[in-house]
Image (tube, rainbow, N blue to C red):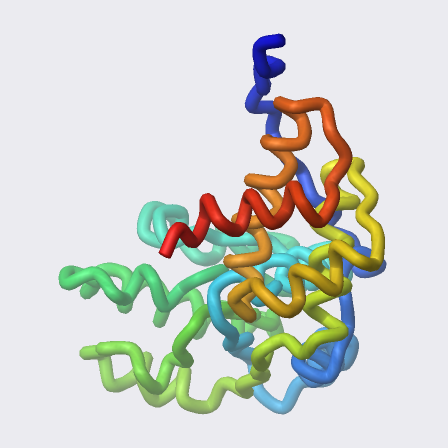
Amino acid sequence: MSPQLVMNFEHRPGLELEDFLVADCNRDAVAWIDRWPDWPSPALFLRGPIGSGKSHLGQVFVAKTKAVAITPEELLANDPRGLLSDAGACLLDDMDIAFEEKDHAGLEVALLHLYNTAREAGISILMTGKTPPSRWPLQLADLSSRLKTASVADIGPPDDALLAGVLVKQFADRQLRIDSDVVAFVQLRVERSFVALGRLVEAADRLALSEKRRITVPLVRRVLRELNPD
């Protein structure tokens, strides 16, 4: 029997507050979101590794505050007054990636104008990224000094409980259930990162669908061997 054809439907995980798993490594960041608008400075920077849940928590912030999410491209192409019209807050996701580009002078100017406009209007700014503004290669002294006043909330490395919870959630987002023996098996063998978990879940989902099988320890063992052949 030939393998079942796998269709690449879009995977849409939940982005509501109840979908976000709170643990010791992210509890402080969640507390900052809950504390809004009582922040000591106009801006908060949410720092964490790739796949740690920064963007998810950013979407929780958007839902909570009716914030406007602004991309670097939108920031460069629009007047900040228009971007922030009727907004109580704004989200700038993965801003440090934009500042890894060599030519970002225009983005610095645009971000400075956005910051000044938001501060004057009493609008909060949530930024996310792997590295905080103090480590960005900024040339504008005014922008650097303003961003250095931003509060920083960290999301740390996941512990065993959170790894298990994220694993179960990611499979559940795909309408799949896994048993506790699968969770225990993965915890002992997978790289301790959310990115590695995501790759494992996607590959296991595809294999289970192609072979019309449940997610079991033998299936996950095969997936791990394929992902880590060495």
Q: Please state if 49 lies on the left or on the right of 35 as rendered.
A: left
Quadrant, the N terminus: top right
Please name the residue shown 63% across and 69% down the image. Answer: 188
Please name the residue shown 79% across and 45% down the image. Answer: 172
Please name the residue shown 48% across and 71% down the image. Answer: 49
Please name the residue shown 80% across and 58% down the image. Answer: 181
Q: Quadrant of residue 99?
A: bottom left
Q: Please state if 137 lies on the left or on the right of 202 as rendered.
A: left
Q: Against 159, is 204 above or below?
A: above
Q: Nearer the viewer, residue 11 or 98?
A: 11
In the rendering, at what x and y percent does residue 143 appear?
Answer: 32, 79
In the rendering, at what x and y percent does residue 153 appear?
Answer: 58, 83
Q: How many marks?
A: 0
In the rendering, at what x and y percent does residue 123 appear?
Answer: 60, 70
Q: Nearer the viewer, residue 43 or 31?
A: 31
Q: Nearer the viewer, residue 97 or 194?
A: 194
Q: Quadrant of residue 23?
A: bottom right
Quadrant, the C terminus: bottom left
Residue furthest out toward the left: 102
In the rendering, at what x and y percent does residue 132 appear?
Answer: 41, 80
Q: Against 175, is 137 above or below?
A: below
Residue furthest out toward the top: 1
